[in-house]
Structures are given as structure tokens and as C-alpha cells.
């Protein structure tokens, strides 16, 4: 243990899916109270609260949550940072603890998204007459693919097909097989929105959303919340042996945005900031991708999973197809990826996802993942990326 290490003390996520009888605060409270109980602490022990919710970014979700679970006068940060909102909220709690301002912090991410339908990337009016460049720097929309789709499935379809064009081997069927893997993994995760196993044929013949991603190859819009309690190294040493044994070390916590790039300032680029986040995280943790036992990455679409094998350096540049074909990312492979079922099966309540991915890794490192446990897992990585752009990478290590 090093003096400024920060540890996960408690963690929880609700089941993702449709929750017609719970509102945003109900879901946030459920995950938060369970995370506090999991850590053996109460809201009175918390020195900071960071609350993420993208769809209700200006609603003061953190303060509303306090009114439900306990108002103690602590600083509250309401966080909104695209699909990296949950990871950003957690980083706020981590940084507060790291700075010494608090010895325990709470982060929660929550979203009510079931039935939202296609999420657009920008502000273009749907009844606009054609694709008139009217955004900043002559763009058609605030976030848009090269082919002018203005929707997330379109942008991410482009990302995967561009990779296939560059390096070869990425067929429609290959992307469907990535989805088949994650849906197979989900059958072991009771918290996933969709736990059904699909054949490759079923996946390929389902409704086409944006080629090559059919419906089961897309992250499902759904409701859910995830919460986490973090603690300083100093404080952890004063807690019980059981709390210390179950604590999970946060060896790296990194957030990046798009760097300057010659090619364009408006088109989405999910690669560069993810590669930079991965490099920084490996350096911070003092480990390499070869040390990882499992990865939860942001497979918002099957096409995204492929490019992130490469971006997170799980394989050599250009070799993501070979990495998948080797069986490495299967749950019994060399480096299991998305054993939770990934966003394609687990669902993607946006602000909850960043914390939920970290929750999954932490649960395996604690040896508490039940029949989906990756045996002997000691080190894991969790990744999220949101267009706009924001990327969060966390590396976790099991307590010695
Ligand atoms: C794929 C998408 C278009 C489907 O939207 P929809 O047609 O409104 O679909 P619904 O959520 O109502 O689901 C209809 C049915 O399709 C099936 N289904 C939908 N998504 C599924 C998935 N990922 N896996 C398996 N089945 C799925 C289910 O049977 C579902 O019915 P049920 O929830 O009652 O069981 C939508 O979820 C979507 O846009 N996803 C991408 C979200 C996104 O862009 N997020 C940001 C990423 S960066």
C-alpha cells in the first residue's frame, strides 16, 4: 500500500433493463444504499458525492439523491460527460480522496433510458431540409459520421468498417460473432438486461440498425444505476480485516479528451483518445496489457469492440481480427473481454455504464462473481468512451 493509494470499498449496480416503477432517484438510491452497505459504511462517513446523469444533466441529481438517502452537507458534484459520465463521477470522488480533502467518497451514475430509440449525436433538426453544413467549422451536426448519419449507430458502424478497410478481415459475420460471444457471456450475468443466447445467424438476420450492426449488436437503451464507495489508504488501514481484504486497489484512473489532430476538428474519433488513455493508465499502474486477467470495454456496438481491442493495446496495432479469431477474448480465453455480456447484452444506461464496468472488474478481483467468475483474476481494466469526446480507463488490482 502506498500513502496516496485509493481503494474501492463498496460497489453495487442495479439490474439493468426496464424499470417502469422506479424513477431516476429510486434507482440511484437503490445502487447507492447497496454500495454503502457493501462497504460497511453509511452516508455519514462520506466526504464527497459525485452524481452522474446525462439525460437530466441540469436536474441536480446529486442533491435530489441526498434528500432520499441522507443530507449531510458534503460537497456535491453533478457530472455530465457523455458515455464517460459514470467514470468521470468516480474520478471526482477518487481525486477528492487522493487530494486529502476527504477520506471516503461516493460516486453514482444513473439513467432512465428505456425506449429512448436512436440517440442522435448533435443538434440537427430532424425536419431539416437536407444536410446543410451549419455547425461549427462547417460541420453538418455537432457530432456526425463521415457519411452524415448523425446517429450513434451510424458513427460506430463507420468506425468498425474503417478499421476493416485499413487492416482487412472485418466482415459482417465477424462483427456478428463478437456479438454472439457477448450474448453468450450474458447468460451468466443476472444483472444484464438481455440474458438470451443468440446464434450468429439470428444476430445477422435481426433488424438492421446501421450496417453492419443489427439490433442485438447495439447496446440497448435501458434504465439502471451503479454506485461506488472509495477510501484512502490511511482510512482503509483503520477498518476491519474483512473490509481490507475485499478492498480493490485503483492502480490507474485516467480521463482523456480529443487531442489536436490534423485531419479534422469535428468528426468523431474514438481511437486516439482511447489509445492515449490506455498508454497513460498502463504507465500509472506500472503494468502492461499482458498483465491483465480481464477487460470490460465499451462495446456500445459490435464494431466498437473490435477497434478497442487494438486501442487498448490488447493486441498489436492492426491485429484486432487475429486477436478475436485466436479466442483470446472468450471467457475461457487468454484475456476475457466483456464477461458481463458487455453493453450489447447488459444494456447501456449511459451514466451508469462507467461505474458498472468497473463494478464488474472489481467483483471478479474480489472473487465474488459467482458462476461467471474468472478464476484467479488479480488485475483488470475497465474502459468507457463517449462521443464529444471523453474516455475513461481504470486499472484495478486485487488486495494482496
Ligand atoms: C438498438 C436500438 C435502436 C433498439 O431500440 P428499439 O427498437 O427502441 O428497441 P427496444 O429497446 O424497444 O427493444 C425492442 C426489443 O428488441 C430486442 N433488443 C433490443 N436491443 C437488444 C439487444 N442489445 N440485445 C438483444 N435484444 C435486444 C428486445 O427483444 C427488445 O424487447 P424487450 O426489451 O421488451 O425484451 C436502441 O437500443 C439504440 O439506439 N441503441 C444504441 C444506443 C446508443 O446509441 N447509445 C450510445 C452509444 S455511444
Image: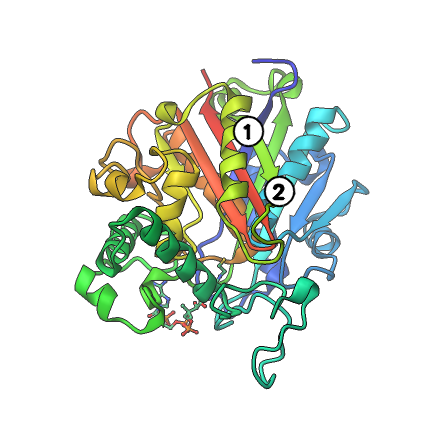
Q: Nearer the viewer, mark 1 or mark 2?
A: 2
Q: Locate the C terminus by quadrant.
A: top left
Question: Is 238 or 234 nearer to us in this picture?
Answer: 234
Q: Name the residue under label 1.
A: 280
Separation of marks 1 and 2 at Cα, in angstroms: 14 Å
State the residue at coordinates (55%, 20%): 240
Q: Which residue lies furthest to the front in this view?
A: 262
Mark 2 is surrounded, within 10 Å at the Cα level, by few (under 14), some (14 to 19) or many (20 or more) other residues, namely few
Which numbered marker is on residue 159? none
The mark nearer the N terminus, 1 or 2, is: 2
State the residue at coordinates (61%, 61%): 24
Which quadrant of the view contains residue 303?
bottom left
State the residue at coordinates (48%, 45%): 271
Image-based side of 330 in relation to 399, left or right: left
Q: Quadrant of ligand 1?
A: bottom left
Q: Name the residue under label 2.
A: 259
Q: Locate the N terminus by quadrant.
A: top right
Local secondary structure at mark 2: loop
Image-based side of 368 in relation to 355, left or right: left
| 167 over 55 or under it: above or below | above
State the residue at coordinates (61%, 32%): 230
Local secondary structure at mark 1: helix
Image-based side of 176 in relation to 56, left or right: left
Q: Which residue lies furthest to the right in this view?
A: 73
Question: Is 113 or 67 nearer to us in this picture?
Answer: 113
Image location of residue 385, percent across then percent down: 52, 48
Amino acid at each position: 500500500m502506498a500513502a496516496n493509494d485509493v481503494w474501492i470499498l463498496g460497489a453495487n449496480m442495479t439490474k439493468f433493463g426496464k424499470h417502469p416503477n422506479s424513477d431516476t432517484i429510486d434507482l440511484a438510491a437503490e445502487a447507492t444504499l447497496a454500495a454503502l452497505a457493501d462497504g460497511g459504511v453509511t452516508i455519514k462517513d462520506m466526504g464527497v458525492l459525485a452524481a452522474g446523469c446525462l439525460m437530466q444533466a441540469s436536474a441536480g441529481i446529486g442533491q435530489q439523491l441526498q434528500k432520499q438517502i441522507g443530507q449531510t452537507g458534503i460537497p456535491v458534484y453533478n457530472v455530465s460527460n457523455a458515455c464517460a459520465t459514470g467514470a468521470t463521477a468516480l474520478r471526482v470522488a477518487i481525486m477528492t480522496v487522493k487530494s486529502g480533502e476527504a477520506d471516503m467518497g461516493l460516486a453514482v451514475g444513473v439513467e432512465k433510458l428505456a425506449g429512448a430509440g436512436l440517440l442522435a449525436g448533435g443538434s440537427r433538426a430532424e425536419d431539416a431540409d437536407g444536410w446543410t453544413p451549419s455547425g461549427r467549422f462547417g460541420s453538418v451536426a455537432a457530432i456526425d459520421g463521415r457519411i452524415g448519419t448523425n446517429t450513434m449507430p451510424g458513427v460506430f458502424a463507420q468506425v468498425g468498417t474503417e478499421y476493416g478497410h485499413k487492416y482487412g478481415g472485418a466482415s459482417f459475420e465477424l462483427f456478428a460473432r463478437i456479438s454472439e460471444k457477448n450474448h453468450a457471456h450474458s447468460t451468466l450475468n443476472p444483472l444484464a438486461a438481455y440474458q438470451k443466447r443468440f446464434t450468429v445467424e439470428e444476430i445477422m438476420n435481426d433488424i438492421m440498425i446501421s450496417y453492419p450492426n443489427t439490433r442485438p449488436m447495439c447496446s440497448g437503451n435501458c434504465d439502471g444505476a451503479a454506485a461506488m464507495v472509495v477510501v484512502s489508504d490511511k482510512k482503509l488501514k483503520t477498518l476491519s480485516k474483512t473490509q481490507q481484504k475485499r478492498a480493490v486497489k485503483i492502480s490507474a484512473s485516467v480521463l482523456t479528451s480529443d487531442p489536436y489532430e490534423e485531419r479534422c476538428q469535428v468528426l468523431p474519433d474514438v481511437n486516439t483518445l482511447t489509445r492515449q488513455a490506455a498508454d497513460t493508465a498502463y504507465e500509472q499502474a506500472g503494468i502492461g496489457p499482458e498483465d491483465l486477467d480481464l477487460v470490460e470495454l465499451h462495446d456500445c456496438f459490435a464494431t466498437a469492440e473490435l477497434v478497442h481491442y487494438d486501442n487498448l493495446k490488447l493486441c498489436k496495432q492492426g491485429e484486432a481480427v487475429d486477436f478475436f479469431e485466436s479466442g483470446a477474448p472468450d471467457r475461457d480465453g487468454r484475456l476475457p473481454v466483456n464477461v458481463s455480456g458487455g453493453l450489447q447484452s447488459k444494456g447501456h444506461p449511459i451514466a451508469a455504464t462507467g461505474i458498472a464496468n468497473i463494478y464488474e472488474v472489481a467483483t471478479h478481483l474480489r472473487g465474488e462473481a459467482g458462476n461467471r467468475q474468472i478464476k484467479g483474476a488479480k488485475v483488470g481494466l475497465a474502459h468507457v468512451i463517449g462521443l464529444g469526446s471523453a474516455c475513461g480507463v481504470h486499472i484495478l488490482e486485487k488486495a494482496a
